[in-house]
Amino acid sequence: MKDKLREVDPALVVAERARALDRLHEREQAGEGYFAFGELRSIIAALDGLADTTELKDRLAKLANDPACEQGPSRRRLTSNGNVLWKQTF
């Protein structure tokens, strides 16, 4: 569709955008800011030219200032009260 080989299917674009934003939300809820940043960049690249990505680009700019994105990937396991049980940095 982006290469104009077939017509843009608005329903497909909306459905794929919704699925991608669900994946992004899961990353953010899991505290994986670094990976959420990459996911959002991929979403913008996929939807650019097919849908309005202004909102997503604004969200990307905000996420870029998140300390979790700046620190890079890490794994951590939290207890129910928020204490870190273990942390692994790559």
Image (cartoon, rainbow, N blue to C red):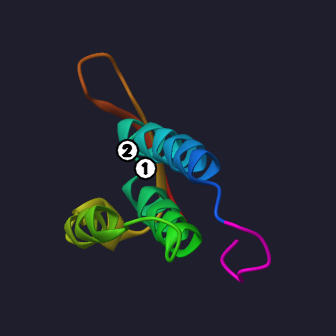
Rendered residue at 43%/50% (across/down): 32
Work out which residue is located at the far front of the displayed protein and give it: 7
Residue 50 x/y as whole percent: 53, 69
CB under 8 Å between discs 2 and 1: yes
Residue 87 position within the rendered picture, expressed as x and y whole percent measured from the top left: 44, 47
In screen coordinates, is 48 left or right of 82? right
Q: What residue type is labelled 2?
A: Glu
Position of residue 31 relative to residue 34, above or below, is above
Q: Nearer the viewer, residue 23 or 90?
A: 23
Residue 42 drawn above or below residue 76: below
Q: Give the range drawn in magenta.
A: 1-7
Total labels: the figure holds 2
Q: In which quarter of the image is the N terminus?
A: bottom right
Label 2 CA crowd tier, 10 Å (few <14, some 14–19, many 20+) = some
The kind of secondary structure element at disc 2 is helix
- Quadrant of residue 67 within the rendered picture: bottom left
Where's residue 38, x and y in %? 49, 67
**SS class of the residue under badge 1?**
loop
- Is 76 a magenta residue? no
Q: Is the magenta stretch mostly helix, strand or loop?
A: loop
Residue at numbered disc 2: 28
**Quarter of the image that includes the C terminus:** bottom right
Name the amino acid type tagged 1. Glu
Marks 2/1: CA distance?
6 Å
The numbered mark at residue 32 is: 1
The answer to whether residue 24 is above or below residue 52 is: above
Q: In the rendered view, does 22 fall on the left or right side of 1? A: left
Q: Nearer the viewer, residue 77 or 68?
A: 68
